[in-house]
Amino acid sequence: MQIANIRIESTDARKRAVGTVTWEDCDRPSRDVYFETTEEFGGYLSIDTDAFVTAAILAACAHGERRLLVEGEICPVLRDGLVTAMSLVSHWYHLGWEPVVLEGKTRSTGRPRSSEQRAAVFLLGDIDSLATLRANRLDYPPRHPATVRDGFLVYGLEDQPPAFEHLLASLSAFARATDITLIPVHTNLRSLDDGWEFWSDLSVAPGFSSIAHAFKRRIGRASIAAGYDIPNLYPHASHPLLDPNYGSYDVAIRHDGVARSRLAKTRLVAEWDVALAALRVCDRSEDYPPGYLNCGRCEKCLRTLLALLALGALERAITFPGIDLSEEIVMTTIRLHRRNIHFYRELIAPLQEIGRNDLARCIQRKLDRYHAAGWVRPFASFGRHGVNSSLRTIRQLLHHDRGSGPGCAPRRET
């Protein structure tokens, strides 16, 4: 793989940093990968290599590229981290990958540290990212350099256009109320491999990190909200062992919030009315009732509503349509798999404490059936090619989601 002709382009009151990616060892078309923002933030876009190398490295590895040759200089801190990340992913998933050889000049100096550089978080409107911001507000003095002042809102990674427009509207109001500068970013980095399994199982952290590198003129530190807490960690595309390796001397990447359970994070959001008013956990934008940010009926919505009920915050959850949290809806909607089972375990006691023994019993019944079915965690070895089918198999192994096909894989947990 080669990355060359990194440049800034302007179009329709927008600016983008663009690099041309050419494959060498596999039959995939060359394409321009870009990071685009509004004119207001366009001056912060960087044209050095860090963003593009970070975005492309795992795609190069997955598709059998022997090297990644970049036109420009590579930060030695980032180079070392990417080698570690490739090795870690290969070990976790038994892929047998050798790290892609990074070719390019080594950058001899770092950007001078400046008080102008800011801390940022990737805002998705979900429990994890809102809790990360709330914890930062509570734990850091306002003038501390690590106090988050910027929020990246990214289009082109997960959301479809209607969902992104919903999110943009709600988070714009949230940003004004919380003194956060919202930076909208459009990118096509997933065009390097647009399979959902590749994104969700390998590329979340390098994808988000590459955006932080693209804005290194403004950002010195970026937080990726943890999806899982320490007792429930497992190999995943965003992980406390993995994410910091996508940082450089200029931009540190932090995996944030891993010490808090999902219920603890939900409590942080529930205690912050302005965040609760912007909460969006649902991917099914086509099912949103008018005026709401969640469908209120999918598994993610139900799980979040049960937690809010247990915390006494359900009546203030104004981004969800009204719903009767009954035994019937719990039994028919909850579908347990490897990635969500622990979220339900921690709801049983709080629901019992508020007198909702009916819902606690339903969840326990679901958990008992899941465990009674039994599962075996097999391991396999995958070659450098056929990566899409391999990742689908990996996903099934990690989720233990019996009877589901690749198209049924759950989206990133929020």
Image (tube, helix red, strand yellow):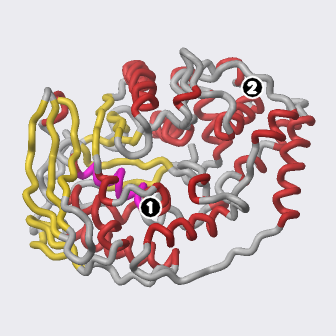
Q: Secondary structure at mark 1?
A: helix
| Image quarter of residue 161 | top left
Q: Which residues are magenta?
A: 202-213
Relative image position of residue 307 (x, y in whole percent): 72, 35
Which residue is found at the position 38% from the left and 55% from the top?
194
User: Which residue is more in the foreground, 26 or 119?
Assistant: 26
Q: Is residue 380 left or right of 101 when viewed as pictured?
A: right
Instruction: From this view, report whether residue 140 is shown above or below residue 345.
Output: above
Q: Secondary structure at mark 2?
A: loop
Instruction: From this view, report whether residue 245 is shown above or below residue 38.
Output: below
User: Which residue is more in the foreground, 213 or 332?
Assistant: 332
Please identify the quadrant where the C terminus is shown: top right
Judge the density around disc 2: few (<14), some (14-19), many (≥20) Cα neighbours within 10 Å: few
- Give, as a three-letter code, the residue at label 2: Gly
Instruction: From this view, report whether residue 235 is shown above or below residue 348.
Output: below
Quickly name the residue at label 1: 198
| Image quarter of residue 281 | top right
Which residue is found at the position 52% from the left and 21% from the top?
274
Q: What predominant SS class does the magenta segment belong to? A: helix
Quickly name the residue at label 2: 312
